[in-house]
Image: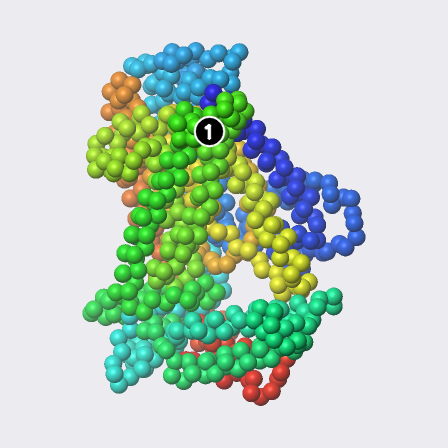
Amino acid sequence: MLVSALLTSLAINFGLCILFFTLYSILRKQPFYYDVYVPRLLVEGTSKRRSRFNLERLIPSPGWVRKAWKLSEEELLSLSGLDAVVYMRIITFSLKVFLVAGIIGIFVILPVNCTGDQLEDIDFADFSNNSLDVFTISNVSSGSKRLWVHFSAVYVVTIFIWYLLYYEYKYISSKRIAYFYSSKPQPHQFTVVVRSIPVSVQSSISDSIETFFSEVHPSTYLSHIVVRRTNKLRGLINDAKKLYKRIVHLQGNSTEHKYGRAGCFGLFGRKVDLVDHYEKKLENIEENVRLEQSELSLAGDEIPAAFVSFKTRYAAATAFHLQQSIDPTKWVTEQAPEPRDVYWPFFTSTFFRRWISKLVVIVACILLTILFLLPVIFVQGLTNLSQLEVWLPFLESILTITFVSEVVTGYLPSLILQLFLKIVPPIMELLSSIQGYVSHSDIEKSACSKVLWFTIWNIFFATVFSGSVLYQLSLILDPKNIPARLAVAVPAQASFFIAYVVTSGWTSTSSELFRLIPLIGSLITKPCKSNTDDELVVPTIPFHRDIPRLLFFGLLGIAYFFLAPLILPFLLVYFCLAYIIYRNQFINVYEPKFETAGKFWPIVHNSMIFSLVLMHCIAVGIFTLKKVSLASTLIFPLPILTLLFNEYCRKRFLPIFTGYSAESLIKKDKEDQNDATMDEFFDKLVTAYQDPALMPLQFSTNTDSLHSPLISSAEV
């Protein structure tokens, strides 16, 4: 029955993948859909619209696959940055691991499992009704010498993963240093963020900063920009942008009705020319924006935080790493993000508020994790038809139909779970944004970690130990029994996770290619938009959503390769799809929103270490239950050696990802001494971190002197 349900799930997803690939090959050629599929090419001017009908556009073409396959790493680096390279290295790392593990698992371990006699012999005449348990380690008799094959496989794959992790960490570290050496002077390399600035009654925040850094860093301090509260101003600017787009749409569409009511929702009031009406409203909003900017520039609502710039990279790094005050909660410094990466809406002012925010976020994550157990329990009920018939007796007649029962037990549970998981990344991103981070990249890294551990706990552990919250808490409070319980529970859920890889992995990757949600949004909003290039918004890849998915499938493969090696071919197909599809997305769709220079890799490394330790714990429990005590004892050194290996990598490579060495910084500073453009760069550095809300705004066509900006771009 389980095999039959899996085959049904496989057939459905294979059909969906073929459909997605075919539709993508067709739709990506249509001018109407360019804003969904190839916005990068449109922005860069490398694609041309064709207005005439062409039958060739309706024929699926493999040309995009060939182009994605031929893309070199250097081309990807120049096109999308080092973060995109790291993302693709995650996929290639997983392919290498599961290719080796797959060869061992399919050609060595799987025959050993199938020829076991613990459960039953395989009836190939009735293959679809067999249980997947006969393909797992559960079918090997207790005390059998065959279990030493599994023991040897654990050691071989562990050593291979150690080697790959070390190689990748070393390689990406070298790429990060090379990326730094090849980069031009960037504002964030010379700047730090200073928060919790103490201010006396007699002086302003700006005066306090000037006095402090002129005394502490007299020879290297350059300038500063104080952060101000501009939430109200941003609201006005957003209103102005919406009105401007509405005016452009009305002016660009000759068939659009340009007259309407001036009252509420356009239903009441006198009849007016909508273009003139909106232009007057736009002028009033712009006037309010200028007045608000003027007030902020003269005596604005300042936050005890600022961007402080220095004359050299080494000086900025020194200010970041050194404690600036005797009180560690004052003059707190951190690395400045790129100007385009700054997250302005939530600039937490004090050390205490940031600390409270982190506590609130931790509590919220715990509550979300507990609440998410409800859909997990429901999904586990779907995998058990007898339990489902007890819950919903009116479905008993429908569930007796073979195809319906196979879809419900094999396909529907993982599909429902995937739909519930869709809401998790946005929630985690929201929670991370209120923790006081000052950059989008830090928010995404924090959200990435949250989504990863949420997924591991709620999808893996909550599914494996399906039961009450109290049962799972008792497991945590009694860690000695974790290996034994894992040994019993993990193999039992092999069929569910194989179906989950097929449903969640294959479907999500192929739908990423098809971009179904943006397509539907484009179909809905396209008639309401004017045909202007200014409205095209290039999307960015959501690392906090996609990296945890890759790492979770990596965890499933590492944990199950010696228990149920049948999962490995499905994982290989998933990562092969991801390899081609995401290379295409980086070429045609996504544009980098920020550049962390590979800072996501430590998250990847830690996740793989956790997966290895989890596999070792399961192996200890399995060999204990199977009464091979010597094998269980010999597995014990592996988690210890893995943690020691991780500690070595942390000491050897992690400092490269937290900051650049003095040697590297001084070398770059010396190169700048011979650069004639540095004076111009320092002139721009003074205003590089000016809040965009305080920049001059001009949408309306009125060029009266009253509409000239009331603030300059000078230092605030």
- Comparing 60 with 385, the one in front is 385
Could you tell me residue 644's position as x and y percent? Answer: 27, 40
**Residue under label 1:** 394
The residue depicted at 56 percent of the width and 33 percent of the height is: 13
> Mark 1: few, some, or many residues within 10 Å (few <14, many ≥20)?
few
The residue depicted at 35 percent of the width and 28 percent of the height is: 490
Could you tell me residue 715's position as x and y percent? Answer: 43, 80
Q: Is residue 659 visible?
A: yes
Amino acid type, mark 1: Phe
Circle 1 — which element? helix
Could you tell me residue 262's position as x and y percent? Answer: 61, 75
The residue depicted at 21 percent of the width and 37 percent of the height is: 477
- Comparing 17 with 596, the one in front is 17
248 shown above or below 487: below
The reply, left or right, for residue 537 in relation to residue 672 is: right
The reply, left or right, for residue 215 in relation to residue 544 is: left
